[in-house]
Amino acid sequence: MLLSAPLAFLYCLATITIFTANTRNIGISKTTNDAVSENIVEASHSCLGVDESDPKCQQYIPDKSKRNFTWLLLLSMCSTVYGAGYIFSSVALSMGTSVVESLIFLFFETLGSTSTMCGLTVAVTVMFEIPIFQLAPKLLEIFGPEKLQEIACMAYITRVVGYTFIPQNRMWMVLFLEPLHGVTYACAKTSQVEFAARLAPKGYESSSQGILSSVIGVGSLIGLSLGGWVEDTLGAKVMYRGFAMVALVGLIVLFIAGKLHGKSIESKHEEKKPLVLPTHTTKTNYDSAISTGEET
């Protein structure tokens, strides 16, 4: 654990650095001639570190918005309360799921599990993932990405808290909780893909999903590093209940962000409503109602 976590962090950091560096070449024109393409790339590299006002290098230097595209895309996803709340919830859930996926068999061994039972639990989880992925378009149409993320969080909380109440040598009870992992994984992944696609500029859907996956991967890194220490220090039950609380906080933040986002949309609709002027008929009815009230 002490070795794999830093290596995973370095891998994620290297991936983000390479992706960011590659966006510097977005502004370079593409050509079908390989020889011309190589010359253009070499020329652009020769201009690195040179004054950007140099007219010889102007044609090879992309504008600043393109060079900072990766960070601008990430900021655009976090620019609203809803976006920030959703990403926070996804990172919190990722912290919890990473612990389950990597450390759960160690906990099962303390409950008296066999290797056959551990393999059976994986089969049960996959059996419930496949139909949910198959129904993903319909689920998105009915619930939307926000509700699917909330369902994933609730399924995770129920599952890990249930683990902590399973008595010794009663591993068969785990099989009743394992389908919830399929619900968590399938709903979360479906929701995240749709969330990134909706916020991405046209043509950059894959880039948005890659950036979102990198951010969520940081949650996995933190979850594994912290989870391993907590399990060694306080025990597995405390660890799983603690990460259930983390996922619950993410669920609450997402729920509040969704409510605030809905209210902001309603207020904008109210502002855009046209002013309805009274017609002759409504004015006559209004005057007659007033006169009737004065008589009474």
Image: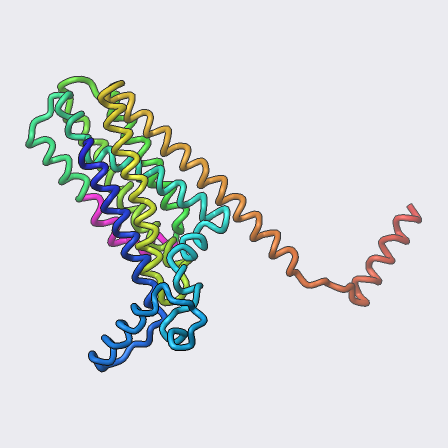
Find residue 227 and report its horizontal and vertical position in percent. 26, 29
In the picture, measured across the screen, residue 235 lies left or right of residue 77, that is left
Find residue 133 and report its horizontal and vertical position in percent. 25, 51
Compared with 157, 194 (above or below) is below
Residue 131 is a magenta residue: yes
In the picture, measured across the screen, residue 216 lies left or right of residue 66, that is left
Compared with 179, 168 (above or below) is above
Q: Which residue is the extreme one toward the right?
A: 295
**Residue at position x 15%, y 27% in the image:** 106
Quadrant where the N terminus lies?
A: top left
Compared with 110, 90 (above or below) is below
Range covered by the magenta-colored residues: 127-141
Front-most of residues 80 and 188: 80
Magenta residues, dominant SS class: helix
Residue 85 occupies which quadrant of the picture?
top left
Compared with 79, 42 (above or below) is below
Quadrant where the C terminus lies?
A: top right
**Residue at position x 25%, y 25% in the image:** 229
Front-most of residues 129 and 58: 58
**Residue at position x 10%, y 31% in the image:** 117
Find residue 77 and report its horizontal and vertical position in percent. 43, 52
Residue 43 occupies which quadrant of the picture?
bottom left
Image coloring type: rainbow
**Residue at position x 27%, y 26% in the image:** 162
Find residue 199 and report its horizontal and vertical position in percent. 42, 57
Residue 50 is a magenta residue: no
